[in-house]
């Protein structure tokens, strides 16, 4: 057990519990050393059967628990800033679920705190970069055989939205994944956003603007459109098509199991992100553990987390105003010299 990377997991909800399971049963080279959650019962249930795990109500105390060498943050977004800064103070490498910090002001504070260290400690959990289909599309675009990318057409659909989900959250929670994926796939910053509001679906809760059509502009003239529909009712679907000067490529067409019985065939449709992106999460955490044990930090950076927060805020302003809204990023610190690859 001494050779394993001791990880403190902050948050034992839906995402945190899944990461605890992943660290214990899927990922090699790591173990859960501590878990923190305000709900002590939930925390104990999440680590039931695991040896040598301390349980904490306070996330900062979990960072100081015996055996903790790294941190995985899966708590609600508003708690991320305090946890990230505490980890930086202790020199602990961090894998932080998105959003890094929900508001751009707090995200900038985290960015500047890490930049002052002169080295990276944080990897942000934009797991689509670890999905096999997204990686193939990225390699194809980087290879240049299709020519310059002109447009990305994206679809992001959920079966239903959780209670208290707001119209703004379609942009700053759901579309935040497309924000990062577009920046990464194209190797460009997003410079402006417009949000169009079609008539809401009958399946949307009262007052929720759902679906929405989000249009991003990039620094080198490409366009990215996103259909976000969080109460589609039938499945979790994520698709992306790149249209380039010499061809196009599309990912996300379901290649799932087809069940044939009693004279009919039925194709399975994923019902949530933990199913659709299970392999991506596994690969993301394994790569993080491997890099951390080697003293390296890879993957999406604090700059990527900050940029996503700024762009999402611009998207919410565009939703509320009905107008095209420019994206204004702070100067990029030298530590983050380019878009993370």
Image (cartoon, grey):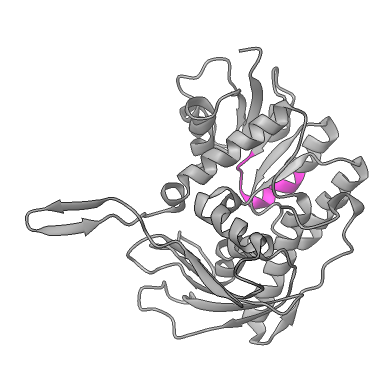
Q: Which residues are magenta?
A: 73-82
Residue 129 in percent (x, y) is at: 60, 52
Point 40% across, 68% down: residue: 231
Residue 229 position, x and y percent, is 45, 71
Q: Is residue 190 above or below residue 252?
A: below
Q: Is residue 25 above or below residue 117?
A: above
User: In the image, is residue 246 part of the stretch drawn in magenta?
Assistant: no
**Residue at 41%, 73% in the rendered image:** 204
Count up the numbered dots: 0
Q: Main secondary structure of the magenta part?
A: helix
Q: Is residue 61 visible to the viewer in this orientation of the structure?
A: no
Q: Is residue 80 magenta?
A: yes
Q: Residue at x 72, y 81 (%)?
A: 325
Q: Residue furthest left?
A: 262
The percent position of residue 266, horizontal first and vertical second, equals 21, 57
Which residue is depicted at the point 66% across and 14% down? Answer: 3
**Residue 170 visible (yes or no):** yes
- Which quadrant of the view contains residue 324? bottom right
């Amino acid at each position: 057990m001494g050779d394993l990377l001791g990880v403190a997991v902050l948050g034992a909800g839906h995402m945190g519990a899944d990461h605890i399971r992943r660290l214990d049963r899927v990922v090699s080279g790591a173990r859960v050393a501590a878990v923190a959650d305000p709900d002590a019962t939930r925390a104990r249930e999440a680590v039931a059967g695991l040896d040598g795990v301390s349980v904490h109500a306070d996330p900062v105390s979990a960072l100081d628990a015996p055996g903790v060498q790294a941190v995985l943050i899966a708590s609600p977004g508003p708690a991320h800033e305090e946890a990230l800064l505490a980890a930086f103070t202790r020199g602990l490498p961090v894998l932080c679920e998105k959003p890094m910090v929900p508001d751009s002001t707090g995200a900038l504070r985290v960015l500047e705190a890490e930049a002052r260290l002169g080295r990276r400690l944080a990897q942000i959990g934009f797991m689509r970069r670890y999905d096999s289909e997204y990686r193939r599309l990225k390699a194809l675009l980087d290879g240049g055989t299709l020519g310059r990318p002109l447009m990305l057409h994206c679809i992001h659909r959920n079966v239903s939205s959780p209670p208290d989900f707001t119209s703004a959250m379609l942009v700053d929670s759901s579309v935040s994944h497309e924000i990062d994926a577009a920046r990464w796939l194209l190797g460009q910053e997003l410079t402006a956003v417009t949000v169009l509001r079609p008539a809401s679906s009958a399946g949307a809760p009262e007052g929720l603007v759902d679906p929405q059509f989000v249009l991003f502009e990039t620094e080198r003239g490409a366009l990215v459109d996103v259909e976000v529909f969080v109460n589609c009712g039938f499945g979790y679907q994520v698709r992306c098509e790149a249209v380039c000067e010499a061809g196009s490529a599309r990912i996300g067409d379901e290649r799932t199991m087809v069940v044939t019985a009693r004279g009919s065939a039925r194709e399975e449709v994923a019902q949530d992100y933990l199913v659709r992106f299970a392999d991506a999460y596994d690969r993301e955490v394994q790569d993080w553990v491997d890099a951390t044990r080697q003293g390296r930090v890879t993957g999406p950076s604090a700059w990527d987390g900050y940029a996503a927060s700024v762009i999402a805020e611009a998207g919410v302003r565009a939703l509320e105003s009905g107008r095209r809204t420019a994206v204004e990023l702070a100067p990029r610190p030298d530590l983050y010299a380019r878009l993370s690859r």
